Every structure is written in structure tokens, then in C-alpha cells.
Amino acid sequence: MLERVVTLPLELQDKVRTLAREKHMKILFSKPDSTIQNDSIMDTDECGVVEEHECDEDLFLKAASETVMHQCISEFIDVTGNEAVQQHVCMVCAREMWSREVEQYAVDNILNKQCLLPADFHPAHKSTFSMLLETAIMQKICGRLYGDVCHDCSCALNDNKAPTLSLSNGM
């Protein structure tokens, strides 16, 4: 788009800049928490942090700097890279979850273990510390068993409730 605007005659470029600036000001001043001071716009976000936006006409329709582009690419890779989209299995409910949706726990540190006791015993059940957990995904680190627990199961156990989808709940 920038390449296209630059090829326009100067008077049309000025017109595009003016219209874009007016639209930008209209958007900014439609917010109740924006104020203008000197040649910059002060904008307050949801957290109360004041951000300053320069109203420099020379920067309008200019390409982003190399550092901004590299920062954006880096952030994109962080949220879409292999580590971010890696699947984990909750040892309480055996659901597949994204890595950001689980936390690693030592099996012997799980709160309210009584909530993970099976309601009905079955010969195929393999209990771990008398809890019915998915053992295939556990790892032994320094002599202790570790596994991932999803946020839903963790919250339920913190509230001293059996997780709705837990293996011990007949799911």
C-alpha cells in the first residue's frame, strides 16, 4: 500500500495524509481517556499506563523500522513456535492440552488426594499414591514422579472438589 501511495501525485498524497490524520484523531478522541498535549497524543490504556503517540506527519505511511519488524517476528515465533504449540496430557483427566494450559506437579505434592480416589475399584486401575492418574505420561525426575495437570483440574483440587473430567470420576 505504501508503494502505491508514494506513486500518487503530491496533492493526492497530501489529501490521503489529511484524511488518514482526521480519521486517526476521530478514533483517538472518541475515547474518553485521550488528551492532546503540544504535538503529541497522550492515551491511557486499561491499566492506567500513559502512552505517547507522536503526531509527526513525516512518519505517516512510512515502513516500520528494522527493530520493530524483528520484535514483531520474534513475538510471533514465541507464540506460534514448537514449544508454544506442544501438546501435553493432563495426568488427572488425560485430556490433551496446550503447554500454556498445564502446570507440572510432583505426584506426591498434589493437593486433596482424596478427591482422586476411584469411586469404584476395577482390576485394570493402576493407582499411584492411591490416586487414579494417567501413568503413561509421568516422568521420574530425581526419584520423584512428575506430570502435567491442567488448570481445570488444578482449580477443582484447590477447591477440594473432584475434577469433573478426572479419571477417578468415572470419565
Image (cartoon, helix red, strand yellow):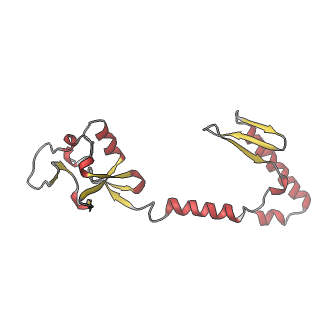
Question: With respect to residue 42, does 107 lie above or below?
Answer: below
Count of numbered circles in the view: 0
The foreground one among 165 and 131 is: 131
Which residue is located at x 21 percent, y 40 percent? Answer: 115
Question: With respect to residue 32, does 14 lie above or below?
Answer: below
Which image quarter: residue 49? Answer: top right
The foreground one among 99 and 49 is: 49
In which quadrant will I find the N terminus? Answer: bottom right
Q: Position of residue 126 (x, y in %)?
A: 14, 55
**Residue lying furthest left:** 123
Which residue is located at x 23 percent, y 55 percent? Answer: 134
Which residue is located at x 72 percent, y 63 percent? Answer: 65
The foreground one among 33 and 17 is: 33
Q: Position of residue 110 (x, y in %)?
A: 26, 46
Q: Position of residue 129 (x, y in %)?
A: 17, 50
Question: With respect to residue 13, does 36 lie above or below?
Answer: above
